Amino acid sequence: MSTMNIHEILKYLPHRYPLLLVDRVISFEAGKDIIALKNVSINEPFFSGHFPHYPVMPGVLIVEALAQAAAILTLRTEDTTSKDDRVYYFVGIDGVRFKKPVMAGDQLMLKVAIERQIKGLWKYSARAEVDGQLVTEAKLMCTSRNI
């Protein structure tokens, strides 16, 4: 198991502000799973419109944060980094459930495990938690393609 700080994460993900949604990797085991962290700040650009009177993180961004954690897991498992000629894509999202809202000030724990990998297609089970309570769960499918 190993950790990653933001400087290491930037080597693996092509995302940048305001779409970089992983702040730290808490633990990682190649070919198995990852636990990553997203600090949800009131300064996030989406809070000005979602919703000004009740700042809730959009569910689609929680799923995106889980996908970014999955990308780090896959790239580190393959022992490669982000490249200008390759892009990591969603190919499917199943069984998404939102159990509780994620609010400004929350610390989102992103837990992603590889279920299987076949011919460049990766399937994961993913869950996001705040204070040990499940807030979102999903099955994700991703692949990378040359561009």
Image (cartoon, rainbow, N blue to C red):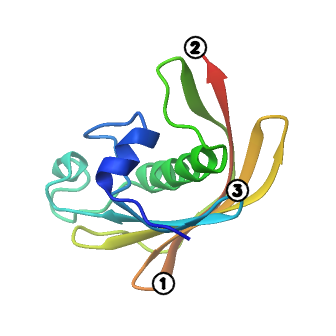
Q: Which mark is residue 3?
A: none
Q: Position of residue 80 (x, y in %)?
A: 57, 38
Q: Residue at x 53, y 17 (%)?
A: 85
Amino acid at circle 3: Tyr
Q: Residue at x 38, y 55 (%)?
A: 22
Q: Is residue 99 above or below residue 66?
A: below
Q: CA distance from mark 1 to mark 2?
A: 39 Å
Single out the residue that lies furthest toward the top.
Answer: 147
| Residue at the farthest bottom position | 132
Mark 1 or 2 closer to N-term?
Answer: 1
Does 6 sit left or right of 143 as displayed?
left
Residue at point 58%, 14% (across, down): 147
Q: Quadrant of the N terminus?
A: bottom right
Q: Amino acid at mark 1?
A: Gln
Q: Where residue 56 appears, x then y in whole percent?
A: 30, 62
Numbered mark located on residue 147 in the image? 2
The residues tagged by marks 1 and 3 sit, at their Cα atoms, a distance apart of 20 Å
Residue at horizontal 29%, vertical 69%?
Answer: 103
Q: Could you tell me which secondary element the residue under label 1 belongs to?
A: strand
Instruction: Please tell me whether mark 1 or mark 2 is closer to you in this view.
Output: 2
Residue at label 1? Answer: 133
How crowded pointer 1 is (Cα within 10 Å; few <14, some 14-19, many 20+) is rated as: few
Q: Nearer the viewer, mark 3 or mark 2?
A: 2
Q: Nearer the viewer, residue 8 or 106?
A: 8
Seen in the image, is 32 located left or right of residue 76? right
- Disc 3 is placed on an element classified as strand
Task: Establish if 6 lies above or below 80.
Answer: below
Which quadrant of the view contains residue 106? bottom left
Residue type beneath disc 2: Ile
Q: Which of these two is toward me, 66 or 119?
A: 119
| Residue on which the image places disc 3 | 124
